[in-house]
Amino acid sequence: MRASNETKTEKVQKNLKTILQYALLPLLVVLVLSGCSENGSAENILAQVTGNDPVQDDLLNYINEELIPLQTEESALIQKYNEKLDDPNSGDAELYDTLQSIIPDYKELIERIESIQPETPEVRELHEMYIATANKQYNAMVQMQAATEKHDMNIVSEANEKLDEARRGEREFSNALEKLSKAHNVVDDQGNSNE
């Protein structure tokens, strides 16, 4: 009789082992994926396993509902500023007047930019880059307005440095947006990673 009890115990142990193996297999897969993944956050791994990616959803909303409309408006204001800045027939008075009309609109735009609250930390971090860049652009315009009013070339140089910082910030933002888009399979309408 003892032999049959051992056989029964062995069967229970074998069944328990099999159940544990199948129960722990998904956890093992997640751990392996996190070690091998380029961006090994738990959120990304969960997205790969479940097909649900909250960062992708947040990024799509951010780009389509928030970023594109704001960047369209921002581009129009910057274009107006650059046209006047680059016009050889435009003097300080015309540049000052242009800035006088652009700066309040740009300030209002920044307030709307700053009011955006992305849901995920990844998109929030990206958005903070955009806020910083927009503020640098705004501060450069304000400084350029002061320079034209005072006819001070030192202030013009400082404003140009801020404009360069803003352009660098735009490039860094674009690169970060592209990287995050690639990591979360967000593509534009032509099938390219968002650039």
Image: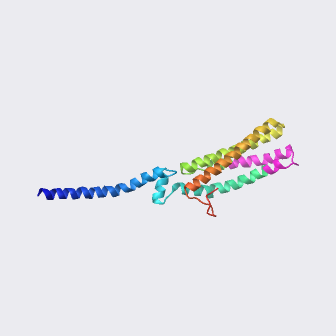
Residue occupying the point 78% across, 41% down: 144
Q: Find the residue positioned furthest to the left.
A: 1
Q: Nearer the viewer, residue 163 or 104?
A: 163
149 over 174 or under it: above or below:
above
Q: What is the tally of numbered marks visible in this picture?
A: 0
Left or right, 18 with respect to 182, comes to left
Q: Find the residue positioned furthest to the bottom.
A: 190
On-image quarter of the C terminus:
bottom right
What is the magenta segment's predominant secondary structure? Answer: helix
Q: Position of residue 185 (x, y in %)?
A: 56, 58
Tell whether position 88 is magenta: yes
57 over 96 or under it: above or below:
below
Q: Position of residue 136 (x, y in %)?
A: 70, 43
Q: Quadrant of residue 2?
A: bottom left
On-image quarter of the N terminus:
bottom left
Q: Find the residue positioned furthest to the right.
A: 89
The coloring applied to the image is: rainbow
Q: Nearer the viewer, residue 146 or 169?
A: 169
Residue occupying the point 85% across, 49% down: 87
Residue occupying the point 67% across, 54% down: 70
Tell whether position 120 is magenta: no
The magenta-colored residue range is: 82-109
Left or right, 133 with respect to 28, comes to right
Residue occupying the point 64% across, 49% down: 173
Left or right, 155 with respect to 166, comes to right
Q: Quadrant of residue 73?
A: bottom right
Q: Position of residue 165 (x, y in %)?
A: 70, 43
